[in-house]
Image (cartoon, grey):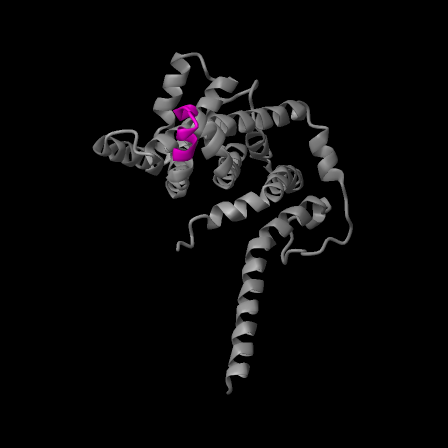
Amino acid sequence: MNDVGASRVWRVIQYGFVVLLLFVVAFPLYWLVVQSFKLGNELATDPPIYIPSEITFQNYEQILSKAGLLGNIFNSVFVALVSTALTLTIGAMAAYSLARRQLPANFRNWLLISVLIIRMFPPITTIIPYFVLLAGFGLIDTYVGLIITYVAFGLPFAIWILVGFFQELPYEIEEAAMMDGASYFQRFRLVVLPLARPALAVTAVFVLIFSWNEFLFASILTSFNTKTLPVVMSGFISDKGIEWGAMTALGTMMVVPVIIVAWLSQKHIVRGLTFGAVKE
């Protein structure tokens, strides 16, 4: 086989692998959406029905008519947005200080290792003492308690992601700002943050997805006032069975905002994921 033939075969293999990978990634999303439009007698069949015989919106009507759903949507949106904003703000300042070596080297390394160790702890191991701590401060079933929780668990990820990006930024740009009389905070706000928008976009999307989808702490720290959508979804599982139609309909509604945010941030996400990958 000549070089041209071998190149074509290799290209076909590559495209085949991409198509297979795309199928593996996209099929669960397809199945979620299709299930939400099925009739009740087609939801749990053997063999499964991949293409519904009739499109129905009764599952969405059931969800939208559920009492308190608008309040649950507001809870999820408010908690996710505030948690993401606070995590980015605190994480960016902490990461910048650690990246620019403003602290003694030993203390800086100890802080980074401590942050990583905190991130390695499974959340389930801390849920009981965390519940007792928040109960002592009267923060159970409150926005403040849930937001503090999400910020605490999102900060290690944000700091470790942003430290690497800040270290890649050329320090000469900040030196030029220093020559113009910019203070430390002015350099950070007016010079560093605009350059780090791709990194901030990547971090924001991942932190937002975590806050939007988190179930463990939300199920334990909330009851009525601040119940979020993942907790509402778990209510469709009972001793009477699983309401697949309503569950998949709500799941589809939860996926759509995340996809929109990722799509709007696509340019920055691609730049952020490839930032620093090629060095001269």
Q: Is the magenta stretch mostly helix, strand or loop?
A: helix
Q: In which quarter of the image is residue 70?
A: top right
Residue 274 point in image, percent of width and height: 47, 50
Please say whether residue 190 is visible from this viewpoint.
yes
Q: How many labels does the image show?
A: 0
Q: In the rendered structure, does residue 178 fall within the stretch colored magenta?
A: yes
Is residue 141 visible in the rendered structure shown here? no
- Farthest-out residue, bottom: 1
Magenta residue span: 175-185
- From this view, report whether residue 251 is shown above or below residue 149: below
Q: Viewer-proximal residue, 242 or 272?
A: 272
The answer to which quarter of the image holds residue 225 is top right
The spot of residue 120 in percent (x, y) is 33, 38
Q: Does the magenta stretch include residue 144?
A: no
Q: In this view, does 128 lie to the left or right of 2?
A: left
Q: Which residue is drawn at 30% across and 35% down?
A: 112
The foreground one among 115 and 118 is 115
Q: In the depicted view, which residue is nearer to us: 116 or 88?
A: 88
- Left of 251 or right of it: where is 270? left
Residue, x 56% and y 73% (percent of image)? Answer: 12
- The x and y percentages for residue 57 are 76, 41
Above or below: residue 49 compared with residue 35: below
Instruction: Tell me what residue is drawn at x 60 percent, y 39 percent.
Output: 261
Horizontal relation, residue 53 to residue 148: left or right: right
